[in-house]
Amino acid sequence: MVLEKLRLDGPPRRVAIVTGGGRGLGREMALALSEAGADVCIASRTQSQLDATADFIAERSGRRPLTVSMDVREREQCDALIEQTVTHFGRLDILMNNAGIGDARGGGTQVDQLSDDDWADAIAVNLNSAFYCSRAAVRVFRKQDQGGVIVNVASGTAMRMYPMGLGYASAKGAVMSMTRSLAAQVVGDGIRVNGIVPGFILQSPPETEEQREQAAQRGRFNSTGRLGEAWELGPLAVFLCSDASAYITGEHFVIDGGGMAGGIAPTGWPAPGVTV
Amino acid sequence: MKDWERKPGFDLSGKKALVVGFGNPVGEAVALALAEAGADVAAASATLDGEEVMAAKRVAKRVTQLGRTSMSQGWDVTLPTNVQVGLRQLVKEFGTPSILVFNGDAELWKPATKITDSEFANVQQVNQSGAYYAARSFLRERKDTEVPGRLIFVTSILGERGVGWNTGYAVTKSGALGLMLGLSQEFGQQNVTANAISTGWMEWTPGRGPDDIGENRLMRFIPMRRFGKAEDVAPLAVLLASDAAGYLNGQVFHVDGGVSQHL
């Protein structure tokens, strides 16, 4: 039955890691996985954010997430994240590589002004992080020999022109390539690897009139006439992490309100120094 | 802090759906999945082929057994008036559907130079024109824009990748993608999304060869090393049909064991 396939409460109950799980899209995806029955570990740099999100998820789903404060740019810390999760919950089934920084260092900088360090940082936080965590997770998945799921969160900026973040868009493009090739490497172990490609999504509900106006302004070029909302990633995450998507691998799920299909120019995101 | 107003991803309670096309097993699997998720589901055949019309009737009965409302109709989607009148009648008896799944799927597996005019016309009319007529009538009957509208076209990766002997079929399936893309933009602001589920080499795909991978070169190109089943497709239709899928729009989602991403 279809609805059973969308559950993550087993047996065995699935264990999921969501990097960048303290806020925004990661928080919503972690919540949705938890509500679908998974035990969840959320990881990010800021412990206070993790604590608040853990409280929120525990209150709604009845199960408290494990929190791990860490820096995904560091290989040792990625290895430790996987190890801690397995130690705490006894297994690992799902990895969502969601950590990343859209306005990373060097954002908006023209290519001839972009420093080595800023370029390297954009690659480290958006690409290396996904590689380190995936490698460590696949080692566990193969040892468990019960399959596994990896979902990489990429970005629409990887598929079209994005002058505001050369490093970010490049790293996310590489994440998409990694999704496909990694999917082919591990398919024989019953491990599926897919990607979510968000368009313009509000990370949290607009609080002020100014924020609401800004969101409305940016959303009106989209065919749905609005920006996406972070919670809309939740059901998609559950679908991709569950047996409901058993015959899907190496695939990218664009969630952008139709932006990629029709284009969303002018976006309100002009190139530096360019007036639209 | 303000919180989101989240909507359920897989609950279709109170929704009315119409599934068109029962010439392959996807129609039945999707209809039953939508019903399981809470929707009332009507079934219409895409052709007047006796077996397909009977399949639509059987599905309607099974939907009813799940405790939902249903009805079935025999359609010939190559006739736009038939589609319009059929849907108008369905609206009167069943109610206005807010979800349309189009699964019209005439097959054509033949060398390009051997396809006759009538064979080419038929596959085009069922798979491509039929998709348009069904979507157009669905949109014409749509009155309440507060209720999210969902257009889901079941297509095939054979409309996106070149495969010999599939040329005639490919034209129609890629045409349906163009239809979906246009509608996703034209009706997005009216609370309607349009998407495609692109199926891979399915158990019933003509020319797919034997099940034994040792004898089947084609299967070695499918990363998951098996052909797709109707049950593989159905859950995605539930997600796309839900109120939570309002930002999934204008996309082609492949359910294909990874084959379309293979080199």
Image (cartoon, coloured by chain):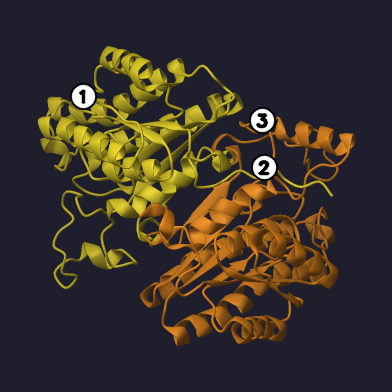
Chain colours: A orange, B yellow
| Direction from residue B183 to residue A233 in the image, left or right | right
Q: What residue type is labelled 3?
A: Gly
| Residue B112 image-quadrant placement | top left
| Direction from residue A207 to residue A237 in the image, left or right | left
Which residue is disc 2 drawn over?
A228
Q: Nearer the viewer, residue B122 or A244?
A: A244
| Direction from residue B211 to residue A117 in the image, left or right | right
Q: Residue at x 15, y 33 (%)?
A: B54
Dot 1 falls on a residue whose secondary structure is loop
Q: Quadrant of the C terminus of chain B?
A: bottom left
Q: How many numbered discs, if any?
A: 3
Q: What residue type is labelled 1?
A: Gly
Q: Residue at x 40, y 44 (%)?
A: B197
Q: What residue type is labelled 2?
A: Gly
Which residue is disc 3 drawn over?
A225
Circle 2 residues within 10 Å: few <14, some 14–19, many ≥20: many
Give the alpha-carbon distance from disc 1 to disc 2, as whole Å: 39 Å
Dot 2 falls on a residue whose secondary structure is strand
Which residue is disc 1 drawn over?
B74
| Residue B196 seen by the camera | yes
Whether tag 3 and tag 2 are in contact, CB under 8 A, the answer is: no
| Residue A22 seen by the camera | no
Give the alpha-carbon distance from disc 3 to disc 1, as whole Å: 37 Å
